[in-house]
Image (cartoon, rainbow, N blue to C red):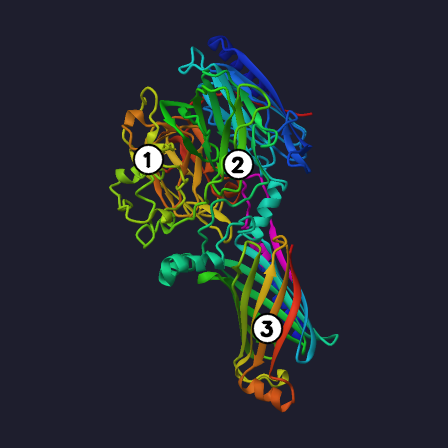
Amino acid sequence: MKQFSRWLIAISAALLHFSAIADVTEYTLIIDREPVNITGKTVERITINGGIPGPIMEFTEGDEAVIHVVNKLDEPTSVHWHGLLLPPEMDGVPGLGGYEAIKAGETFTYRFTVRQNGTYWYHAHSALQEQDGHYGALIIHPKDEPVVQADRDYVVLLSDFSNETGQQILSNIKKSPHYYNYSQRTVGDFFSEVREHGLASAWQDVRPWGQMRMSPTDLADVRYDAFLINGQTNEQNWTGIFKPGERVRLRFINASAMSMYDVRIPGLPMTVIQADGQYVEPVTVDEFRFAVAETYDVIVTPQADQAYTIAAESIDRTGFALGTLAPREGMKGPVPDHRPRSLLTMADMGHGMDHNDHQMSQDDSMDHSGHDMHGDNHQAMPQDEPADMQSGWADASTPEGHKALQYSDLRALGTQTDLRPAEREIVVTLGGTMERFIWTLNGHKFGDPGFEPIKLNYGERVRLIFKNETMMAHPMHLHGMFVQLENGQPVEKLPNKHTVNVAPGTEYSVLLTADEPGEWAFHCHLLFHMSAGMMSTVVVAEYDEAGSPAIKPAQHDMGGHHDHH
Amino acid sequence: MIITKSNLILSIVLSLFISSSHADEHYDGHGHEHESQLFHALWFEAQHGGGSEGDKTHIEWDGWIGGDYHKLWLKGELEGHKGKLEQSEVWALYSRNVHDFWDAQLGLRVDTQPESTRYLTLGFNGLAPYLFETQAHLFISDYGDVSARLKQKNHLLFTQRFGFEPYYQLDFTAQNVERQELGRGLSEGEIGVKLFYEITRKVVPYLDLKYERKFGRTASIARNADESEEDWIASVGIKLLF
């Protein structure tokens, strides 16, 4: 049987080879655990080909990708190609879609046809290995002339580094959920509220948080020792060289385990040309909020002979990932001051109608277009509160006159091909309890009794409605297919995304064409939320009346294989 | 007889935990390949101080091992006075998550001091509104008498590391227990505050000031025995998280 399948793979690979006349692009990734010293302390971390992050992998659309992954760890590992369209058994999630983990000491060879272009990344989908260094950038060049020309092209990969392992971090949060939160409300905060707004108002502010047993300071669950750009600390200062007047393409990838950022390059407007590897109509912004697992490609055109600082500030304001664009090596621009840390409001809890939801009208980064489509527009509020009360998850303290990217700004370049309305709606409730660090989709942890995969009929068009009932933002990532954000743009202009950040207490909807058969992971990309249960599966198949997948539609499968050593 | 009964309870607790911990499968985002993962927490407190009757040493532990929904909960208290062990309680409970913020618990409490008694224990542990950490338990001793205890504390900050923890504890009995010099109703209570400094989340030195007193018939029993019915106790202590 094994022999037979080997033959089958060999023949089909050969056939595909002849028919497609594809170029083969081959890589070997060696996954190992080695001492690294990033913050001044030597710790054992996972490296790919000896480094953190792993190498930048480059392909050309239409290539046959052949990637040998050598597991030198003493535990199983895996590599998931984040955002790539490929057969499910090549997607790299152990136990799903026919893919199995790469056992200690073994090598697995991935083979698939590269069907798209853009900026993507890769990372482990095993245990908490991603936090420990198992990630890297993956770039796919277009087959023909690129739509957007640039003189220079740099990957700017952000990550969060801790001197503790992912396992230690998770253990600590399970002991004490606020373990890493050193920005909690104090008695002093309460009394200054009393001084400014009176006892009644101060009490009104703290009362609902007390009743709900939650904290308005839960912006990030983990505090990190360093934020890195391309694996380099702020002191090491990753630098991209330019000549004044050149067009520089920056491929931002947020490969952090838990950290979201507000990204800006003071003095340099950024023109966003791709989101999640998919072209969008150019939109020029001063900053963008960068959720975990998203990518944005921007073009900047620095004119002056000076250093510009790439400043990605974590939304809990505990640090920056800093890099430099400069005409020469060794230059450094000024580091911006930290912006104030937002306090969550009752609106972030979906309790918009209480007394204290000031921010909804001003920001549209929460983007209620998903709401609007369902006739649910209760969040619109008159702007009658003093400026110092403005707060909430979405408040990035963007200076006046500056433009921050909103999801609603994203318009697909060209037109979408599937313009059908949704045949049905599927609600996905994002839930959880910070106090126990349990996170759920539709009320269940992944694999719990009662857990149900989301079943989609092959070819159908559905609307997924994310209902975030928690006080944290969740970047929801679907494997294997792009979704289209219902961001208020016309249907032919809806942008493709592989990761959708759903703000606290809000609802957001996306459209999806179920055209990739197989079993796909679907989860919150905050690594510790996924690990704590916030994951599901989407199964695309032709179902019979009993609801079991009757016929598996044909897959573009080139096969991969495990080597034993 | 007593031993058999308590052994039986203990083995029920353990088997409940072991059988149910299988339900706590831990999925970490990579399919179905992982065994259930156990987490744990153990808070250990040791403090030494004095009241009107001389020095007092107090050791307390409170911890669990298990998953999100099923835990084995272990806790206990030892209190020494003038070098002599005066109070000793050791608890082992099966703890089941029944609500976002609450665990229901069932198990055994074994006292050796002031006198040897075993209790079937049931109750709740969790977080009440306004972030009051709450423990409420009912005890049925192997002599058949019924008692209860309510404990609450709150965690408030002056700075991110320096803060205070007000707390209280109330003990009730449903009948007079001559053996333990307890009178029916509210028998004993304590109220206090810990002033702490978190060097790290796992190492927390503190100062503790506590007022404790006996109530009602329990108080008069103490008076008749020429024992004090109330006391102020100031202590220095350290709290460790494992």
Q: Percent x, y for residue B137?
A: 53, 70
Q: CA distance from mark 3 to mark 2?
A: 45 Å
Q: Which residue is mark 2?
A: A320
User: For residue A30, what is the image quadrant?
Assistant: top right
At horizontal 32% and vertical 44% (from top left) the residue drawn is A360
Tag 2 secondary structure: strand
Name the quadrant of the C terminus of chain A.
top right
Q: Percent x, y for residue A512?
A: 35, 31
Q: Main secondary structure of the magenta part?
A: loop
Q: Is residue A14 left or right of residue A368?
A: right
Tag 3 secondary structure: strand
- Comparing marks 3 and 2, which lies closer to the viewer? 2
Q: Which residue is mark 3?
A: B210
- Comparing marks 2 and 1, which lies closer to the viewer? 2
Tell which subunit mark 1 falls on. Answer: A
- Amino acid at circle 1: Arg
**Magenta stretch in the rendered image:** B17-44
Seen from the viewer's position, the closer of residues A145 and A322 is A322
